[in-house]
Amino acid sequence: MKRLLLCLVLLNSFLWAGAHKVVSTRVVQGVGEGTTRSEAITEALVDALGQLQGVRLSKTAFSKDQLIETDTSSKSAYLYSSKIKKITHGKVNSYKVVEVMEIEPHHYKAIVEVTKRTTRYKYRDAGHNPHNRRTLAVLPFEYKPTYSLHGITIDGRELSRRLTQSIINKITQTRKFTILDRQNSKYYEFEKSFLLSPGTDPVELARIGKRLGADYFIIGQILDFGTDKKEGNYLLGPDETTEEAYATIAYRVLYVPRQQIKWSDTIDIAFEVPPTKRAESLTVKVGDKIAQVLVDQIMFNIYPPRIVRSSGKNIILNMGGNTLHPGDRFEIYALGKKIYDPYTKESLGREEIKIGELEITKVLPKFSYAKVIEGKAKKGAIIRPAASNHNENQNVGKDSMFEEMFHK
């Protein structure tokens, strides 16, 4: 039964998605006077058509085509004519004489109704409304021609491509932004040309003109990348040395409408050298590792995971995908009062009071399960990576400007 219900929900979402035709009808009334019935009706038609947006003509157009045909036996008879469509270029479908009265000898007054039907095509987005989330685009990171890691030469362009794609993958899976593609325009242009080609259903044209502009750009540079040798110590032995990979990445979050730098940082990342000798495999593994550190920093400061359900020691977090992993441990913080800068009057964020710790037990595409291993948890609390450089009892979010820049 549950499976059937799920299928019906999915089917309903697909049925409502896509392009569809919308027909709207507008009826306007015009009044005119003349020395004859036909002249009064003509004046009334000109008056009515003048009220319709996109329809402009004079009464001479009617007289030249001898459009007006009166029917003395029925004042309210419909006068459908292909001539009126021709004269108005199809913008008016029909007119109707409501009333014609003789005010005095050789002086008539006519009232007519003109009907204009407009057909337009709308496209309904599949799934969630993309306008409910901030839009973000990740641009290719700048790079050096080559890098050397463990004696293997890595192509800088390929490393940048892999890093950029990995960042896109990880941010997309958080489901907190509408991610825009800025690297595959040729495919969109191909589809646009196809939709504009002869033989395409007019309804499909509604797909054109739905592109979104970006609220934010993430741009960056791969400043340095390589390996360091570490000398032995009393644990490894005086003659033992190890190699550790490192990367230095500079990145910025730009607010596109104002060309404003909202956040800028340079991060140093150290990690074990991946056990592979193939340049392609190294590029993939290293790109993923760098992207994970960068996305964690961005996401945990902009949208730190929140506890959406708590039952005893078992809790559910509103983040899934590949941002969290089973076995990861985090600290739980209850949010306190807002704090303001006394000089700029801007919000510095909210006081964060540590109330416990948790461990991730299961990760799904949209949310994750965890268990409390110390202290307590409550609905609405946030989690942050475990750290030892702050007071155990309370912490004021040092990167709360992220919250301000995205949540105003």
Image: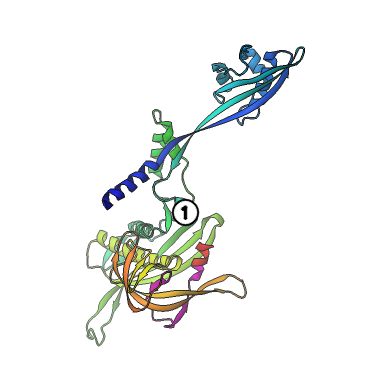
Q: Nearer the viewer, residue 7 or 14?
A: 7
| Range covered by the magenta-colored residues | 379-401
The C terminus, quarter of image = bottom right
Residue at image point 48% right, 71% down: 399
Where 300 falls versus 196 (above or below)? below
Residue at image point 51% right, 63% down: 407
Q: Nearer the viewer, residue 306 or 288?
A: 306
Tell me residue 281's x, y (percent): 25, 60
**Marker count (numbered):** 1
Q: Nearer the viewer, residue 338 or 276?
A: 338
Residue 20 occupies which quadrant of the picture?
Answer: top left
Residue at image point 40% right, 31% down: 201
Is residue 38 shown in magenta?
no
Where 397 falls versus 250 (above or below)? below
Q: Which residue is the site of mark 1? A: 132
Q: Is residue 147 visible?
A: no
